[in-house]
């Protein structure tokens, strides 16, 4: 009997996961830790630091345990996606590959290559605008406001899937384990983050329950989202969504349920508004592909030449990365990023504006550094937002007066003082 490979890279969850219910017959669950994405370099920068790697290992390990509790095995591989899937398909005599429809150009190319040898079925597992709501890329508005006005009235988001898994259809843990030796060695070498620090599915669902239902912090989201530090000023759903440990459809439906049962106000709407921004960048990346990594992104001629810095700019970039520019508000936010792997939305806009417009440094270097550090790294949101600030994306450039921003959002300097006590990396 032929086997279908179910690639779960971007859907590290059991709830509302269409891939787990897609194929009939014999199935094998697979996750690949992409070597280039975590050990490769771009513009001279390592693409992922140790903290991001440890987080990814923890996420995969948690999914493996969750599937094992259902008597389903998870094959965990390390290397190039195309090579790993090709070799596994031969080993298991697989004829089909089911995967989440990718967004990033690199992942799209890999799936296209695999489609030459396997029957590839892509499901849009991580978008609000799936199924009947899927936009036509040719008619996709270039800027956010027309996109929102076009799509928002149509957003009857599909109900999440709730059906149970049938373990008899899947390779069991014992059958999957012989494929996992390299990944097991990685776990031993790099020590994944403990589950208490993980952003896996259990933590994602607990955060949703706490932020929306228990604490009802969603009711003040619009008023507090520009704060710089704390636990409840923002939802912090971004990391879970980026890793696929939280379904965006599930989240949307929970917000709608809260609005129906408890209260609906500007803040509950604003969280949905931010999810539409995420959606906007996902579809823009599907439309323009690799062009987002051009110097001018989606504007002007295509230029993939690596950023060039003179000696002064190179030194300035290193100081920016360390949080050592001498501008307290910038340095505080960068040290928060380096320490925690996270930064508020307000902080991200300011440090990006400072790097691009005050230091005159190619925006792609900032995007690459964020990719290395952010625990909520999402290709489309990260690179799309950097291009947005630079004026190479879906709008004119956005330049912030950092001193005025600091006076407004950190008026007593408490945030800056606290973070400047953190040692530079």
Image (cartoon, rainbow, N blue to C red):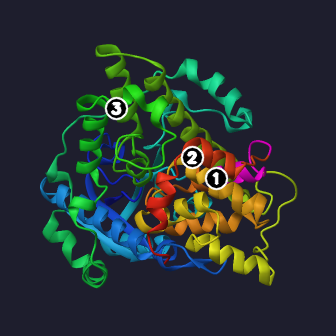
Which residue: 16% across, 46% down? Answer: 166
Q: Which mark is residue 133?
A: none
Vertical placement of 290 versus 39: above or below? above
Q: Which residues are magenta?
A: 384-396
Would residue 70 be found to the left or right of residue 375 on screen? left
Q: Which mark is residue 346?
A: 2
Would residue 175 be found to the left or right of residue 51 on screen? left
**Residue 205 location, x and y as percent?**
26, 42
Q: Nearer the viewer, residue 197 or 53?
A: 197
Vertical placement of 131 versus 119: above or below? above
Count neighbours of disc 2 (C-alpha within 10 A) and say few if under 14, some if 14 to 19, many if 20 or more.
some
Q: Nearer the viewer, residue 367 or 378?
A: 367
Vertical placement of 80 versus 377: above or below? below
Question: Which residue is denoted by mark 1 in the rendering?
Answer: 350
- Circle 1/circle 2 CB separation < 8 Å: yes
Q: Which mark is residue 217?
A: 3
Count neighbours of disc 1 (C-alpha within 10 A) and say few if under 14, some if 14 to 19, many if 20 or more.
many
Which residue: 50% across, 76% down? Answer: 424
């Amino acid at each position: 009997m032929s086997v279908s490979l179910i690639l779960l890279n971007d859907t590290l969850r059991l709830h509302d996961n269409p891939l787990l219910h897609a194929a009939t017959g014999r199935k094998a669950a697979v996750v690949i830790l992409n070597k280039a994405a975590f050990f490769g370099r771009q513009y001279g920068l390592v693409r992922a630091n140790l903290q991001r790697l440890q987080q990814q290992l923890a996420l995969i390990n948690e999914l493996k345990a969750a599937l094992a509790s259902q008597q389903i095995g998870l094959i965990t591989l390390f290397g190039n996606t195309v090579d790993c899937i090709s070799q596994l398909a031969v080993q298991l005599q697989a004829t089909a590959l089911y995967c989440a429809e990718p967004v990033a150009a690199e992942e799209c190319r890999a799936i296209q290559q695999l489609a030459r040898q396997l029957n590839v079925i892509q499901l849009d597992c991580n978008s609000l605008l799936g199924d009947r709501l899927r936009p036509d890329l040719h008619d996709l508005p270039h800027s956010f406001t027309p996109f929102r006005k076009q799509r928002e009235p149509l957003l009857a988001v599909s109900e999440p899937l709730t059906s149970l898994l049938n373990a008899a259809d899947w390779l069991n843990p014992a059958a999957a384990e012989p494929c996992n030796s390299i990944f097991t060695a990685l776990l031993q070498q790099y020590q994944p983050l403990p589950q208490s620090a993980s952003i896996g599915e259990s933590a994602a669902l607990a955060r949703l329950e706490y932020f929306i239902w228990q604490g009802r912090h969603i009711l003040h989201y619009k008023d507090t989202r520009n704060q710089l530090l704390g636990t409840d000023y923002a939802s912090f759903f971004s990391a879970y969504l980026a890793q696929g440990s939280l379904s965006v459809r599930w989240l949307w439906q929970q917000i709608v349920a809260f609005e129906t049962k408890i209260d609906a106000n500007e803040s509950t709407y604003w969280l949905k508004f931010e999810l539409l921004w995420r959606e906007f960048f996902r579809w823009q990346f599907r439309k323009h592909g690799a062009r987002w990594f051009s110097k001018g992104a989606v504007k002007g001629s295509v230029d993939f030449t690596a950023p060039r810095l003179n000696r002064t700019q190179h030194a300035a970039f290193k100081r920016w990365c360390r949080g050592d520019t001498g501008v307290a508000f910038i340095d505080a936010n960068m040290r928060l990023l380096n320490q925690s792997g996270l930064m508020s939305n307000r902080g991200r806009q300011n440090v990006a504006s400072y790097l691009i417009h005050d230091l005159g440094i190619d925006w792609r270097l900032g995007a690459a550094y964020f990719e290395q550090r952010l625990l909520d790294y999402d290709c489309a949101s990260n690179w799309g937002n950097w291009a947005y600030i630079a004026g190479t994306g879906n709008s004119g450039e956005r330049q912030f007066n950092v001193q005025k921003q600091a006076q407004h959002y950190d008026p007593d300097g408490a945030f800056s003082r606290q973070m400047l006590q953190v040692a530079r990396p």
